[in-house]
Amino acid sequence: MAMTGGCLCGAVRYEATAAPIFGGNCYCTDCRKTTSSHSAVVAIPEAGVSITGETRTYTKIGDSGKPVARVFCPTCGTALYSKGESNAGVMLLKAGTLDDVESFKPMASVYASRAPSWDQPPADVPAFPEMPPR
């Protein structure tokens, strides 16, 4: 089943035809600053995602020591997905941009030690204080 989604203004749309690899919540500082909370993401093989519309990219070195590209709509500013060199070939679609947000089911929370008191990881989902070992 394909997952579809897009930005707030509708200028960018995507369709993911590949099966998700995982879904999770990230509480790292970078995700918090780009979302004002935690980042709920669905990992999809990049080859299985098609995107229409213009996007912009901001790249920063992540906790892995490798670049992480964060892609957003230049019109409305919606964060759409991120890609990191440490997870080559995988896109992390922002779950809040899915047309069917109920299709997102978090499997784990990472960087849970950095979660603020007002945005704690769900108790029914495994939580890792930082990034778990591969």
Image: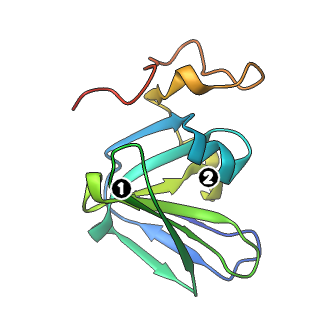
Q: Residue at x 74, y 82 (%)?
A: 75
Residue 44 visible, this orientation: yes
Q: Residue at x 31, y 45 (%)?
A: 21
Q: Relative to 23, is 92 above or below?
A: below
Nearer to us: label 2 or label 1: 1
124 vs 7, left or right, is left
Q: Quadrant of the C terminus?
A: top left
101 vs 105, left or right, is right
The local secondary structure at tag 1 comes to strand
Q: Position of residue 40 (x, y in %)?
A: 57, 42
Quadrant housing residue 126 = top left
Query: Which of the two labelled residues, at mark 2 and mark 1, occupies the earlier sequence position?
Result: 1
Check disc 2: other Cα within 10 Å, few if <14, some if 14-19, many if 20+.
Answer: few
The local secondary structure at tag 2 comes to loop
Q: Position of residue 118 (x, y in %)?
A: 78, 23
Q: Position of residue 77 (x, y in %)?
A: 72, 70
Q: Relative to 109, is 62 above or below?
A: below
Task: Identify the mark at residue 10; answer none if there is no mark.
Answer: none
Residue carrying label 2: 100
Type of the residue with mark 2: Asp
Q: Relative to 129, is 17 above or below?
A: below
47 vs 38, left or right, is left
Q: Quadrant of the N terminus?
A: bottom left
Check disc 1: other Cα within 10 Å, few if <14, some if 14-19, many if 20+.
Answer: many
Measure the alpha-carbon separation of dots 2 and 1: 16 Å
* Residue at the extreme left of the image, as rendered: 134
Residue 3 visible, this orientation: no
Nearer to the camera, 25 or 2: 25
Residue carrying label 1: 44
